[in-house]
Image (cartoon, rainbow, N blue to C red):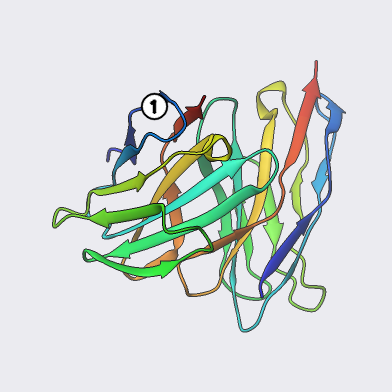
Amino acid sequence: KAGVTQTPRYLIKTRGQQVTLSCSPISGHRSVSWYQQTPGQGLQFLFEYFSETQRNKGNFPGRFSGRQFSNSRSEMNVSTLELGDSALYLCASSLAGDRDTQYFGPGTRLTVL
Amino acid sequence: GDSVTQMEGPVTLSEEAFLTINCTYTATGYPSLFWYVQYPGEGLQLLLKATKADDKGSNKGFEATYRKETTSFHLEKGSVQVSDSAVYFCALGNAGNMLTFGGGTRLMVKP
């Protein structure tokens, strides 16, 4: 079974721009979560989607948003990029009956200049 | 709120040495506990998990036991290899689909 895929793997943007990251979960997984990983803050939860609905949200500003499609694929968007948004963004998927056990993709490395 | 504390690294070992990485947690209720491993330039790989007290998770020679009395989930391996060099993360899930992670422990294994 194919794992979680994320595109693109690398992105370079400038301050003020916006960016969209994509995640395709493992087949059959309906829950998708997003995390931000930085050297200073570690791994921080952004949000979780299940059946196209946001179920849980971490402590991030409104510039960070997401959505989920009917095929469970998810996107996250960051608007008005800041230098501090440079990070590895990780997507994880899980089964509806075992939401805590999450399988991660390879991540998208975002660099904001 | 929930929290996870891991021993700080880096941990440097010689090949075939015994590995212990300490992890303790604070949580309400009955969380599930996980160890993830991250190799350079990659995402997180689920290494093992335990869902209730006294459960032992194991995979690829690594194991960890869910100790509710000491709120711990220490990772152990009897004989490490150079290929085990990576960053290891302890995490807990508390039925909210939001994993809470420790800060990570870098392991370096020398031949």
Q: Going 70% across and 27% down the picture, which residue do you hit?
A: B85
Q: In this view, does B101 lie above or below A85?
A: below
Point out the residue furthest to the bottom here.
B29
Quarter of the rendering containing residue B92:
bottom right
Quarter of the rendering containing residue A16:
top left
Point out the residue furthest to the top here.
B111
> In the image, is B7 to the left or to the right of A28?
right
Quarter of the rendering containing residue B67:
bottom right
Q: What residue is pinned by disc 1?
A: A9
- Position of residue B59 measured from the top left corner of the image (x, y, whole percent): 58, 46
Q: Going 26% across and 60% down the picture, which residue do you hit?
A: A30
Number of labels in the image equals: 1
Q: Going 31% across and 39% down the picture, which residue do you hit?
A: A20
B19 or A104, nearer to the observer: A104
Q: Going 32% across and 62% down the picture, which residue do you hit?
A: A49
- Position of residue B7 measured from the top left corner of the image (x, y, whole percent): 83, 49
Can residue A3 be spotted in the picture?
A: no
Q: In this view, does B56 lie above or below A42?
A: below
* Chain letter belonging to callout 1: A
B33 or A34, nearer to the observer: A34
Element on which disc 1 rests: loop
> Alpha-carbon neighbours of circle 1 within 10 Å: few (<14), some, or many (≥20)?
some
A12 or B84, nearer to the observer: A12
Q: What residue type is labelled 1?
A: Arg
> In the image, is B53 to the left or to the right of A23?
right
Q: Quadrant of the N terminus of chain A?
A: top left
